[in-house]
Each structure stands twice: as structure tokens, then as C-alpha cells.
Amino acid sequence: MGVLALLVAEPGYGYQLRGEFEHRTGGSWPLNVGQVYTTLDRLERDGLVARGDADDDGHVVYTATDAGREAVDRWFSEPAPAKRGRDELAIKFAIAVTVPGVDVQRLVQVQRTAAVRALQDLTRLKRTTDPATDLAWSLVLESMVSQAESEVRWLDHVESSVARYQPTSRGTLGQPDDEDAYGSEPTGRRSGEAVR
């Protein structure tokens, strides 16, 4: 849909579309030019773009059709679907808390260090980006900052959950033995301290 939206703005060819897409998204999702041409073939097959004549340099120029314009209008008017795909980080921790001998607290620290470093890098980039001159990249960057912040918050949650609940002998999570019936903090252990 991103490629089609670019063609609604103006006709273009594969390399040009790849460059425009990467420029507008700050290179955060690099495209293979073969992928762009495969996308153009599918869009043409579905009647959303039309292949035109070659320009003076031999590039085949594509144009959005009326159906393509309608599809882009719908895309811009509807909410993007929620991300429901596999989340490798969540899967890693879901498995780690059930496998004996995995130091989950250490895993949290390693991941948090990487997430904070990424957040610092993105924050530095954000300081050098002027939304007045590059709004498209600024919005993508803000989304990446938000995702990095969310990962750090989630890791804090993982750490506190692991500190609160101990793996049982079956490898599943259960209540700690020293927690009272009202769910108060276990005695003899500080909040956030590793459970061994």
C-alpha cells in the first residue's frame, strides 16, 4: 500500500519508488528493488496500477488507476490492523521462565541494556531531526522511540513478575511460598531481587 500511495501522488518506476519509500521512512525499512518490482507486478495484476511507456532512460513508468486511488483512500481512512504476529522477545521470555537453569533476571538485564542503548540512539537522532523540514521521518522516528520505551517498560514488568513468582517443580509459574493470601510482597526478599 505504501508503494501504491506513492504512485497516487505521482507516476514512477521501481528504483525511484524504492528511493522515495526509503527517504520518507528514514531508511528504517530498506526495500530490495526486486521486492518493489514484484509488488508492482501484483498491483498491476489486481488492476490497481497501469504499466506505461518507458521514459527516456528506459525505465517503465507505472501510474495508479482509479481503483488504485480508491484502495489508497480506503487505506488512509481505516485503522491499521493491530500487530498480532509472533513477538520473538515475548516468546523468548515465555520459554525462559519455564526452562530450568535459565537466569531470567540476567536475560532481562541483557535485553534492557540493548533496549536502553537503542532508545538513546533514537533520542540522539530525534534531536537532529526537524519535523518542520522532514515530517515523514520525524513521525517514523517518534514511533520507533515509543516502541523502544514500551519495550523497556515491559522488561520492568517481566523483572517484577519473575521476582514475585517462582517456577514450580513442573516448570510452570506459581505463587511464591512466602506470599500471604492477600498477595502482599513476599517476606525476606526485596522487590526486584532475583529469584533463584
Image (spheres, rainbow, N blue to C red):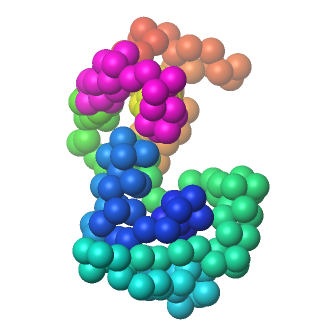
Give percent across and percent down for residue 160: 47, 23
- Residue under the image location 70 percent in, 77 percent down: 66
> Which corner quadrant of the image does residue 70 belong to?
bottom right
- Residue under the image location 57 percent in, 59 percent down: 9
Left/right of residue 133 with respect to residue 104 in the rendered view: right
For the residue pair 47 and 79, the one nearer the viewer reads as: 47
> Which corner quadrant of the image does residue 182 belong to?
top right
Give percent across and percent down for residue 6: 51, 60
The quadrant in which the C terminus is found is top left
Q: Is residue 177 magenta?
A: no
- Residue under the image location 39 percent in, 23 percent down: 129
Extreme residue toward the front, this view = 56
Question: What main secondary structure does the magenta stretch of the protein show?
Answer: helix
The quadrant in which the N terminus is found is bottom right
- Residue under the image location 51 percent in, 23 percent down: 132
Q: Which residues are magenta?
A: 113-140
Left/right of residue 66 with respect to residue 168 in the rendered view: right
For the residue pair 196 and 191, the one nearer the viewer reads as: 191
Q: How many marks?
A: 0
Residue 128 visible at all: yes
Give percent across and percent down for residue 162: 43, 30
For the residue pair 195 and 82, the one nearer the viewer reads as: 82
Residue 28 visible at all: no
Left/right of residue 111 with respect to residue 53 in the rendered view: left
> Which corner quadrant of the image does residue 64 belong to?
bottom right
Give percent across and percent down for residue 15: 30, 66
